[in-house]
Image (cartoon, rainbow, N blue to C red):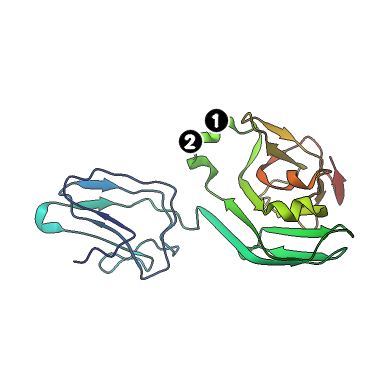
Amino acid sequence: MDSYYSIFNNTGGVISGEGNSFGPPGSRGLYNNAGNTLTFTNNYWGASDGPEHGSSGSGAIVNWNTSNGSSVMFTPFATQPTLASDHSINISLLPDEETIWNADFGTVSLTFNAKASAPEMHHQFCGAMHCYATELLTSEGQFPTDYLPGHLFVVWNSFFLAYYGSSITVTFHYDPSGYSGGLQLYRQEDSGAYLPVSSTQNVPAQTITYTPADPFNAQGTFILVKSRFAPQGFYTY
């Protein structure tokens, strides 16, 4: 036994976890040494067949000290990541030019356009997160009633990219999962409420694009909501 685990629960510790992502496969994910049973269900362990424990699973390692009665309940487990995130600190943008950043998880891209009067910008940051397991969030009760499960996003960028930007366009890629109707983008306000924003749905490409009048509004928390329309090609809300 060694303590170099993402989570090492020692004597007296009582913890639980749900909706987390551990990895990569083969890394030390969770060890319980507290003499109790930990409940870590509905987590993703870096592989679709669950965590590595004994002869089962190929994901991050889950283990415990059997000599003091410790154990971990890890089933059921998620078969895909509960969330994904990516960021960059090397965004460069020249006056009156455009640059595009694509999150490595494939569902968010940001297009930055600079004003002609903007200075040269280098080493700027941006990032995005996609939450797939929305049903596990304690804040789910705040979501619009008819939201599309698994499509909660968070987007951020540096002050200067917005301040000197003529526009910022955010493109969200979605998985309809059997839903063929229209989708509208909602953005969370400072009050916590989600309100619709003007966006364009491209049905063949399965994307929603959003270019706010104020570039500062290109960042925030966003969610896709089912609409009563059933567009066949492009539809702007």
Secondary structure found at label 1: helix
Q: Amino acid at mark 2?
A: Thr
Give the vertical position of 29 relative to 237 (above or below): below
Residue 60 image-quadrant placement? bottom left
| Residue 207 visible here | no
Residue at 66%, 44% (x, y): give it.
Answer: 220
As measured in the structure, the alpha-carbon distance from the residue carrying label 2 to the one carrying label 1 is 7 Å
Residue 215 is situated, as x and y percent measured from the top left of the image, at 78, 48
Give the vertical position of 192 relative to 67 (above or below): above
Give the vertical position of 102 relative to 70 (above or below): below
Residue 21 is situated, as x and y percent measured from the top left of the image, at 44, 56
Residue 119 image-quadrant placement? bottom right
**Total numbered circles:** 2
Q: Which mark is residue 138?
A: 2
| Residue 137 visible here | yes
Disc 2 crowd rating (10 Å Cα; few below 14, some 14-19, many 20+) is few
Residue at 41%, 49% (x, y): give it.
Answer: 42
Secondary structure found at label 2: helix
Q: Which mark is residue 80?
A: none
Relative depth, front residue between 123 and 138: 123
Residue 9 placement, left or right of 148: left
Relative depth, front residue between 50 and 159: 159
From the image, tell me which residue sits under label 1: 141
Q: Outermost residue toward the left?
A: 67
